[in-house]
């Protein structure tokens, strides 16, 4: 089956490569010429474990190709996916659907046969209706007489584990309004169907809402345990044990119960806010999500202040130096969008602290976002001469630092571990003044 994927970013490129690996014939389309040039040269435009090998083997097999020409890319495709960005709209936080609608119009104008148009981008309820209207307006489904079905198929993959998530999803959600849409989507996902991945068919609007509900729920879980961590610090309890103690209850589950610096990334922050906007538009307030957004925002700055406190408070911190280990919003990605590290670094610089940083994959994206921060080429280079080491992202590379060397290189043996990757007793035994999140 021929599939076109419009938008070749974190979601489009991974989905396209995985579909090709299932045996479909896939064209990934992007308007970013530099991105497509890199892909033609075999260079990945993003960091995602395993992606380079997957792309290489499917290109070699002739099942995966890349183009900037949408008309050429969608020619003959039975399923055309829209996987472009839906960032927060400047000013009001609504999802910015400019790119989605741009693609819908172009697809409508260039369509030369029957096709199912699938929104894989995260889009607010009602977007599919608008995509359908735009395509009808171009005459594709009217005077030109093509059968067109607009379907919602939100993506749930996680950066850093994207290929595994795509190939073995907990579920596939498909929101379709007609049999043509449902049949083509069944064919698209047939290889996964054989793997017994559950497919949930819903209405298009329901499917659109499922994605936001899922992200808002996960953001709530993270925020809940973060507040429990604060309470643990006050009452002398251990949040990791609280997590275990509640997570063993199958009704709760152990995932997304790791206390830390607050959620960030390319999805949760913008999607929770977009959900609030939808709720507002429909006069149906979602007060829990409102609280989650507020608490998470405040938390990132609070984590910066935690570091300032570890430096002896606001007076003492001025002129001191902090080494941030990890900048991306989570390990195994180069994605810096809405990473808590940005706010932590800013809070420190606002307090007059000099900031150095190291991240295994994120420094290229981070440098323009953090102009005042000195980027270093190893964790030890960042640590040299520092007054505090801050674990911001739990990359494996930071889990077994040579603590003796850290002590020798740093000006003071102080560590703020915002991911709880070290054990307080071990750190104290190693001579560190050690602060973590929600642990005595
Ligand atoms: N990143 C994730 O982990 C993730 C997970 C699930 C869902 N999503 C959702 O998937 C969507 C895409 O996210 P992403 O992280 O892949 O974004 P991204 O910014 O990495 O990629 C989007 C791509 O679309 C391209 N594009 C924009 N307009 C275009 C046009 N008119 N024609 C062709 N290409 C165009 C851009 O050049 C870019 O390469 C978003 O709605 C996001 O919320 C993302």
Image (cartoon, rainbow, N blue to C red):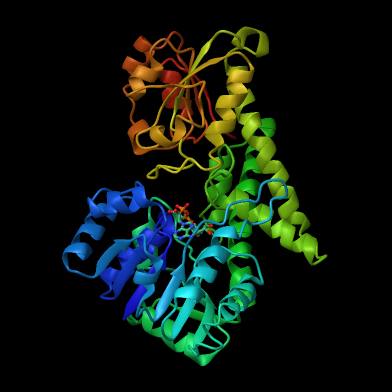
Number of marks drawn: 0
Q: In the visual, does 287 lie left or right of 409?
A: right
Which corner quadrant holds the N terminus? bottom left
Pick the residue in front: 60 or 112: 112
Q: Residue furthest right?
A: 283
Residue at x-position 22% and y-position 51%: 42
Q: In the visual, does 294 lie left or right of 322?
A: right
Q: Residue furthest left?
A: 60
Which corner quadrant holds the C terminus? top right
- In this view, 374 is above or below 207: above
Q: Position of residue 78 (x, y in %)?
A: 39, 81
Q: In the visual, does 431 lie left or right of 164?
A: right
Pick the residue in front: 99 or 417: 99
Q: Is residue 36 visible?
A: yes
- In this view, 194 is above or below 56: below
Residue at x-position 43% and y-position 32%: 326
Pick the residue in front: 416 or 368: 368
Q: Position of residue 80 (x, y in %)?
A: 43, 74
Q: Quadrant of residue 74?
A: bottom left
Q: In the visual, does 65 lie left or right of 423?
A: left
Q: Is residue 250 visible?
A: no
Q: Position of residue 14 (x, y in %)?
A: 36, 60
- In this view, 399 is above or below 332: above
Q: Position of residue 300 (x, y in %)?
A: 62, 34
Q: Quadrant of residue 24?
A: bottom left
């Amino acid at each position: 089956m021929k599939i076109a994927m419009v938008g070749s970013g974190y979601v489009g490129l991974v989905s396209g490569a995985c579909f090709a690996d299932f045996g479909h014939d896939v064209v990934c389309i992007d308007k970013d010429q530099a991105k497509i040039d890199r892909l033609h040269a075999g260079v990945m435009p993003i960091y995602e474990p395993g992606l380079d090998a997957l792309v290489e083997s499917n290109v070699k097999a002739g099942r995966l190709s890349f183009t900037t020409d949408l008309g050429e890319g969608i020619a003959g495709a039975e399923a055309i996916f829209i996987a472009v960005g839906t960032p927060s709209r400047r000013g009001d936080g609504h999802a910015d659907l400019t790119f989605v609608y741009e693609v819908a119009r172009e697809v409508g104008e260039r369509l030369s046969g029957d096709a199912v148009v699938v929104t894989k981008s995260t889009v607010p309820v009602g977007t599919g209706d608008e995509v359908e209207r735009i395509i009808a307006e171009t005459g594709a489904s009217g005077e030109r007489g093509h059968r067109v079905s607009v379907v919602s198929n939100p993506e749930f993959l996680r950066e850093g584990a994207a290929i595994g998530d795509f190939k073995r999803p907990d579920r596939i959600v498909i929101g379709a309004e007609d049999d043509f849409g449902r049949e083509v989507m069944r064919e698209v996902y047939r290889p996964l169907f054989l793997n017994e991945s559950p497919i949930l068919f819903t209405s298009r609007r329901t499917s659109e809402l499922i994605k936001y509900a899922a992200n808002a729920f996960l953001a709530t879980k993270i925020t809940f345990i973060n507040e429990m961590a604060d309470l643990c610090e006050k009452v002398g309890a251990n949040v990791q044990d609280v997590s275990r103690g509640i997570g063993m209850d199958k009704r709760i589950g152990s995932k997304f119960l790791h206390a830390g610096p607050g959620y960030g990334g390319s999805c949760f922050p913008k999607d929770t806010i977009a959900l609030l906007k939808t709720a507002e538009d429909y006069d149906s307030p979602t007060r829990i999500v409102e609280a989650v957004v507020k608490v998470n925002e405040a938390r990132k700055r609070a984590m910066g202040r935690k570091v300032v406190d570890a430096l002896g408070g606001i007076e003492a911190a001025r002129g001191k130096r902090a080494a941030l280990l990890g900048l991306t919003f989570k390990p195994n990605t180069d994605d810096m969008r809405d990473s808590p590290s940005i706010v932590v670094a800013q809070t420190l610089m606002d307090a007059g602290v000099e900031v150095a940083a190291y991240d295994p994959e994120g420094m290229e994206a981070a440098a323009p976002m953090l102009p005042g921060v000195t980027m270093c080429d190893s964790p030890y280079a960042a640590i040299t001469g520092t007054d505090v080491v801050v674990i911001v992202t739990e990359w494996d590379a930071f889990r077994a630092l040579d603590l003796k060397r850290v002590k020798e290189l740093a000006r003071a043996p102080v560590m703020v571990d915002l991911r709880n990757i070290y054990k307080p007793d071990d750190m104290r035994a190693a001579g560190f003044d050690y602060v973590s999140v929600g642990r005595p």
